[in-house]
Amino acid sequence: MKLSSLLPVAAMYFRHWHTDDTEVGIVVAKAEFRPDETGKFRAVPKPAPLCLVDEFEGDPATSPLLREQEISPGKRGTDLTIRAIARAPGGKPLPDWAVSVRIPDRLYYEFRVRGPSEWRRGLLGWRQSDPEPMTEMPISYAYAFGGPARGNPEMEHPPVFEENPAGLGHATSESLAGKQSFAAPRIGALAEFIAAEPGQQMTVHGFGPIAKAWLPRRGFAGTFDENWKTTRHPRMPRDYDLAFWNAAPTPLQIVPGLAGTESILLQGIRHAPEPVALTLPGVRLHLLARGEGGNEERVSLTLDTVDLDLRAPDAGAAIMTLVWRGLVTGPGRFQSGEIQSERIGDR
C-alpha cells in the first residue's frame, strides 16, 4: 500500500503475520510535539524519521535501551516512556528524594533516587554508607539494581541480573566472598532501600524502555526451537504474546490505552517544587484506505506509544513523541491509503 498524508507525520506500511496466523497490513505514524509559549504542545512541521533499530546508551549487552524501534506489529495498551534527569527539590544537595509520574484516574508510579553510596565490609559485617548529597542524576537503569555480580577475581563468568544487566549492586554469596566494598543501587523503592542487605535482590525501577533481551520482556516472544522452525516459520511461535512489543516498564504500560487527551504530572525532575504538568494534544489519527473501483475503508489508528524527553531544565525544551498504529485486514484489497487526523471530540 502506498501511504500519503498532508499531516506532519513520519509513516510506514508493512505486512506482518498476526497472532491468528493471518497476514495483515500494519500502519505506523509518528508525530513530534513541542510546547508553545502557553505550554500547549504543538506538532513540529517535520518529525524525525521512524526509528528502525533499537538505540542503546552504549554497548547493547551492558547498557540501557535509550530508544525502542518503532516498527512493531502492535502493543497491549499504551507505552509511556520518559527520559528525564532527577533534580533535587529546591536546588540544594539532598541525599535522596522521590520521583513520580501520575495520570489522574489511570496511573501512579513512584520511586526514590539517592546519591552515591556503597556496601562496606567491616568487623561486624556489611554496612551501607550514607548516600552523598547531590542536586541531580540521570534516571537510567545504569543506577538501578542489577548488573553483573562483580568482585570475586576467581569468577570467570559472573552471573548477570537478567532483569537489568546494566545496573548496580547485584551480588551473590560467591561474589561477596571476594568483596570488601561495592556500589549500592541509587534508584529503587523506599521500603527496599530501608530493608536492603548485601546480596538481596531489589526491584528494578525507572522510566526508560526495557530491552527485548531483558526479563521479563523476552519471555513474551515465545519459543523459537526446532519445532517452530519446521512447523511455524515465518509465523510467530504459538506461545508468542503481543505484549513482547511493549517496551515500557510494567508500571508504565497502560491498559486500556490512552485516548490522547490525558494530563501527565511528574515530580522530582525539576528544582521547582510544583510538578511538571503536560497534556497530550487531543489528536486522533486514522487511515483512509482506498481500493479499486473507489472502494474506501476507514481504519482507526491506536495511540500506543508516548515518549517524553524532559531532560532539559527548561520546560520549553520538552519533546513529546507520539506513535499511532493500525491494523489493516485483507491488505491486498487496497492500493493506497491517506493518514488523516481529527480533534478528539470532533465527529
Image (cartoon, rainbow, N blue to C red):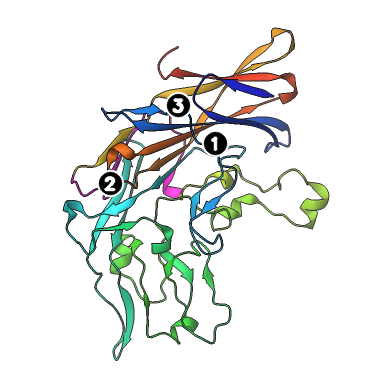
Residue at left offset 24%, top offset 63%: 134
Residue 308 in the figure: left or right of residue 313:
right
Assign a secondary structure to mark 3.
loop
Q: In the image, residue 126 lies at what x, y percent? A: 32, 83
Amino acid at pointer 2: Pro
Q: What residue would you read off at disc 1?
A: 49
For residue 45, which numbered disc appears in the image? 3
Task: Give the farthest residue toward the front.
Answer: 46
Region rendered in magenta: 250-273
Q: In the image, residue 128 lies at what x, y percent? A: 29, 76
Q: What residue would you read off at disc 2?
A: 313
Assign a secondary structure to mark 1.
loop
Is residue 263 within the magenta segment? yes
Mark 3 → mark 2, Cα distance in angstroms? 24 Å
Q: In the image, residue 152 lies at what x, y percent? A: 49, 84
Question: Which class describes the residues within 10 Å of circle 3: few (<14), some (14-19), or many (20+)?
Answer: few
Amino acid at pointer 1: Pro
Residue at left offset 28%, top offset 37%: 277
